Every structure is written in C-alpha cells, then in structure tokens.
Image (tube, helix red, strand yellow):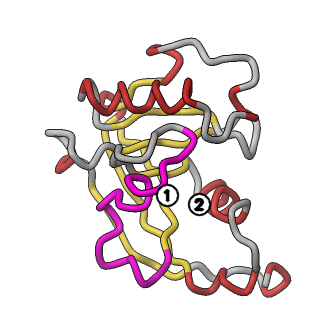
Amino acid sequence: MTLSCFRTVKEQFAADPFSGDGAYEFGGRWNSPGSRVLYASESLALACLEMLVHLDKASILRSYVFIEARFEEKMVVDVEDLSPLPADWHNAQGSIELQTIGDEWIATGSTPVLRVPSAVIPRSFNFLINPAHKEFSKVAYLGPEPIDFDPRLK
C-alpha cells in the first residue's frame, strides 16, 4: 500500500526541500542537532498546524509551499515498535530521550521512514524521512505547490 505525507517549507528553500539542513542545524523533537532528517505529516492540514505552532507572525504564511511525499508502507516503522514513549513525550520538545530514539533510528538505517505521534493534534501522526537512507530514492515527491491559506489566518 502506498502512503502519502506532506511537508511544508519556505518557498526560498523549495529548490532543495530534502536536504534536512534545518533539522541538522537546529534539531527537533525527534532528532538532535547534527542528525539530518525531514519532518512531514500525514495530512496537509496537520503539516500546516505543525508549522503554524512555530511561527511568531501569521503574515509569514504566504512564504510557504508544500510538497507531497509517497512511499510504500513497508518502508515505515512505528516509533513505538522501537521504544516505548515516556508518559510526557508530547510536552518534551527537545527531550534528550526522544531525540535519542530518532537519532538511533537514523543511525541504524532500519527503514527510510519513521512514524511518530503528533504533539499538536492527538491521534495524528508525523513521519520522519531519512534522506541518507539507501532507499530514500524510492520516496516519490510531488510539488512544490503554494498553500492558499484562508485570509482569516493571515
């Protein structure tokens, strides 16, 4: 079965949206600085919400585009198959424990895609994609496309 996910990026980075440079430089919930990974979401709506929680000014919304990624379900492992999550995982931005789970997944190269729960919306999921994985070329991408946000969000 083919799965889809969505990634939002600033338009200025749309020419190379799969470098993982941002996560490499700054780290994230599921990776420490120095680990290259791409963050994406199971729906465009969730991808937008995941991006919105990090913005200081709504006026910046018009500078974002989205890319859809498609991959086979067999390329995905669920984070809870790797390690049980701590009870407060959703409150733990920058948690060493969560970053270690992601860093170890990247280092082992077991799969090109890791499914993790969203801290923004319960019962929703994000995907981490490892651009250095040997099967990364099997991930298909569509876009970039502009995001036409409702003016009330701006």
Between the C-alphas of marks 2 and 1, the distance is 5 Å
Q: Nearer the viewer, residue 135 or 92?
A: 92
Marking on residue 153? none
Magenta includes 101? no
Residue located 76% across and 79% down the image? 57
Answer above or below: position of 99 versus 148.
Answer: above
The quarter in which the C terminus is drawn is bottom right
Provide the residue span drawn in magenta. Answer: 10-29
Task: Kindly indicate the quadrant of the structure image that contains residue 20.
Answer: bottom left
Residue located 43% across and 61% down the image? 22
Say which amino acid is labelled 2: Leu
Marking on residue 44? 2
Compared across the picture, whether 41 is left or right of 92 comes to left
Q: Are marks 2 and 1 in contact (CB under 8 Å)?
A: yes
The quarter in which the N terminus is drawn is top left
Where residue 114 sits in the image (x, y, percent)? Answer: 42, 33
Magenta includes 12? yes
